[in-house]
Image (cartoon, grey):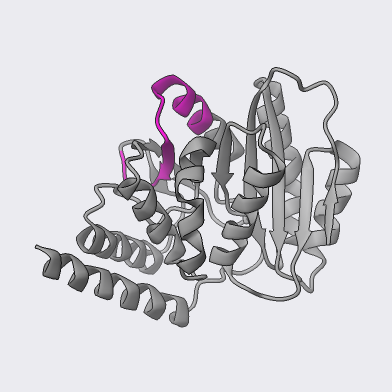
Amino acid sequence: MLLSIGFIGFAGLRSAVIVIPTYNEAENVRWLLPEVLRVLRDAGWRPLILIVDDNSPDGTADAAEEVAAKLGGVEVVRRPGKLGIGSAYIEGFRRALERHGWAEYVCEMDADGSHPPETLLEMLERAERSGADVVVGSRYVEGGCWVEGSLKRVMISRGANLIARMSTGLRVRDATSGFRVIRASALRRIIGELKGLRSGYVFQVQLLYLLHKAGCRIEEHPLRFLPRRAGESKLNKGEILSYASWCLRALMRRIKSR
């Protein structure tokens, strides 16, 4: 099921679709969606927020549709069950390219409030200025940081990024970041290759690797990674093991190809 609220008076504005996968994020989307719309619209952008919800029992999809009815600029895709963040992004990307071809950029953003809307604007403006195909919100470049991140989470994240760089050859410091601005023309180059990607959090590294192999120019922008505003993290041991197993296989392929 899908609810879409159209646009009025946005002709000629710079444009972006922001894909946000959700599962039990009702409290967060009530705050986040209006704020993203406000920040981007005030800066002269035409935003569409595309919520891809995995049948959240807390009414996340309903909360997002309430924002859509009041403010426009929000589209809600209701999925039948918990299908994973990777498949949610793939569905969102396909909808963005097929149904909203006017958009110059397709963005990834978390629903939990850890990605500031103001930083999304900075990343879009950076892509406009530099011509980069991809801008990654990075905790590990100068000016980026964790805000109140636990030592355990920071160590897991840094370890995951080290493994990602070793296994793929990517020079991106924060390859696991789920905060990205992608030029729509760049996403079209690889959209046909996304079907075979994993549905878990390793999807982020796989996606970035595909963009890199397609010749896309990737830049990193400082991100102050904020604490989750409400709810619980979806990362679990199964996701960590899936991530590690894929990276190990990628590393072995890389070694054999030398």
What percent of the width, then of the height, locates residue 162? 24, 60
As drawn, is 94 to the left or to the right of 206?
A: right
Residue 125 forms part of the magenta stretch: yes
Residue 160 shown left or right of residue 13 in the figure: left
Q: Quick one: which residue is furthest to the front in this view?
A: 192
**Nearer to me, 48 or 24:** 48
Classify 39 as above or below 239. Answer: above
Outermost top residue:
12
Work out whether 156 lies above or below 120: below
Residue 213 % position (x, y): 31, 49
Percent of width and height locating residue 130: 39, 23
Please report the residue visible at 80 percent of the width from the left and 60 percent of the height from the top.
61
Q: Is residue 31 visible?
A: yes
**Residue 163 on the magenta span:** no
| Res 180 seen here | no
Give the extent of the magenta segment: 122-141
Q: Residue 34 sits in which quadrant?
A: top right
Q: Quadrant of the C terminus?
A: bottom left
| Among the 4 quarters of the image, the one containing residue 112 | bottom right
**Which quadrant of the rendered structure holds the N terminus?**
bottom right
Label total for image: 0
Q: Is residue 255 above or below residue 205?
A: below
